[in-house]
Image: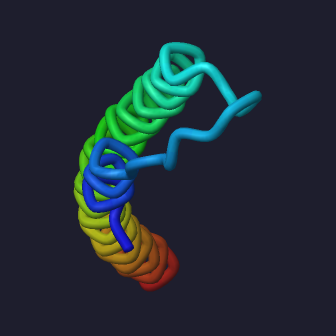
Amino acid sequence: MTIKENIKKILDKKFDSVINGYSPSNVDSFLDSIINDLENIEKTIEKLNSEKENQTKTIEELNKEILKITKENIELKSRLEEIEESKKDE
């Protein structure tokens, strides 16, 4: 059940009236605070998911950059070895 479904369930919940029962206004106030908390939790989850997406993209970009640099490093090492070999032959 999603947070929105839980909020709707809380909003739609009806309590029977009884003598010496709970104050309807107190119950409503308490349920309103629960709904508020759930809405804040939902906003936090959405924010964290968005941040996660952004960080995942950043990680992917950095991994591509690492791969590129690694390839360049291999090429440079190979060139260096060639230069060193050519100097030995001279």
16 in relation to 36, above or below: below
Front in this rendered view, residue 16 or 35: 16
Question: Considering the image in quadrants, where does the N terminus appear?
Answer: bottom left
The image's colour scheme reads: rainbow
At a point 68% along the width and 28% down the height, the residue shown is 22
At a point 50% along the width and 48% down the height, the residue shown is 16
Front in this rendered view, residue 82 or 71: 71
16 in relation to 2, above or below: above
| Res 79 seen here | no
* Left-right relation of 4 to 87: left
Q: Position of residue 76 (x, y in %)?
A: 34, 66
16 in relation to 89, above or below: above
At a point 48% along the width and 47% down the height, the residue shown is 15
Q: Position of residue 80 (x, y in %)?
A: 41, 68
Q: Position of residue 14 (x, y in %)?
A: 39, 49
At a point 56% along the width and 26% down the height, the residue shown is 27
Which residue reaches farthest front? 19
| Res 19 seen here | yes
